[in-house]
Image (cartoon, rainbow, N blue to C red):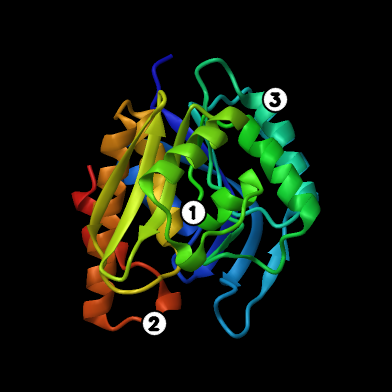
Amino acid sequence: MKRQKRIALVNDITGFGRCSIAVELPLISAMKIQACPLPTAILAVHTGFPDYYLDDYTARMGSYIKSWEKNHLHFDGIATGFLGSAEQIEIVLDFIRRFKQPATRVMVDPVMGDHGKLYSSYTEEMCRRMRDLVAVADLVTPNLTEACNLLDIPYPENGHVEKGNLEYMAAGLTDMGPAQVVITGLGSEDSVANFIYEAGHGTLQEQPRVGGDRSGSGDAFAAIVAAGLIRGDSLTESVEKAAAFVSRCIAYAVQLDLPWNYGLPFEQFLTELK
């Protein structure tokens, strides 16, 4: 039976703030790939707001996955985002063991921290289990903080790292398991860059910096890259498309003077994402 390609999205569902599955699903759908949510939690707003409601879905993930299994569902891609506990990481590892087929691409965005610090929820056990998850990935997209933690090396002073060191770090990450690595969110006050590494070779993709940090940017970037790879685009093409789209959305958010925690106003450009 002919069907569209599809990606299982392992992430939370947030009602307001444009992050996680609420961002990933429409972007992936716009790129003609079916997006199938596997929720880890349901939030009214994300944790960047002063008050948030969170319903932890951990206890129900097993039954949810079992229903997919009983209905003989198959996925061309499995993409993971923020995971809230070591137990959730273990559930995702089991999900991958049960659903990954030879052609299934596993894409892990190890959402662990930023600016040299891990999120307060991250424990040593979670860091160890995240390394286990990275080991079964085909693509991993850490920022510099996450890459340093996964490799157990110090975060560089001022967050600056030379291309030669990026090559070394990316090679170390491929030694853990994934064939492809993108170290994201690099750069300076004037530019932002992503380091793309595969087949023993790395390139730096750079563009002017627009605005500041904004919730959901990483989710949007990872979603576009994932959809691009699943439909057959190269890693470089997918990263360039994702970076350009996120940059355009941030510029529009600046124009609208949106608070950072309102996320990317991607709806304005959704029909242009092809």
Q: Would residue 145 appear left or right of 118 to someone viewing this image?
A: left
Residue type of the residue flagged with mark 2:
Pro
Q: Position of residue 105 (x, y in %)?
A: 50, 27
Please tell me which of labels 3 and 2 falls first in the chain.
Answer: 3
Please tell me which of labels 3 and 1 falls first in the chain.
Answer: 3
Residue at image coords 26%, 61% = 247
| Residue 155 position (above or below residue 198) | below
Residue toward you, 25 or 205? 205
Q: Secondary structure at mark 3?
A: helix
Q: Position of residue 139 (x, y in %)?
A: 49, 34
| Residue 261 position (above or below residue 228) | below
Residue type of the residue flagged with mark 3:
Arg
Report the mark closest to the observer, 3 or 2. 2
Distance from Cα at disc 3 to Cα at disc 1: 28 Å
Please tell me which of labels 2 and 1 falls first in the chain.
Answer: 1
Quadrant of the rendered image containing residue 63: top right
Distance from Cα at disc 2 to Cα at disc 1: 23 Å
Q: Position of residue 230 (x, y in %)?
A: 39, 30
Q: Residues within 10 Å of mark 1 (few under 14, many from 20)?
A: many
Q: Which residue is mark 1?
A: 143
Q: Which mark is residue 259?
A: 2
Q: Which residue is mark 3?
A: 98
- Considering the image in quadrants, where does the C terminus appear? top left
Q: Position of residue 79 (x, y in %)?
A: 53, 40
Residue toward you, 172 or 90? 172
Residue type of the residue flagged with mark 1:
Asn
Report the mark closest to the observer, 3 or 1. 1
Q: Would residue 136 appear left or right of 4 to someone viewing this image?
A: right
* CB atoms of marks 2 and 1 within 8 Å: no
* Residue 270 shows up from this direction: no
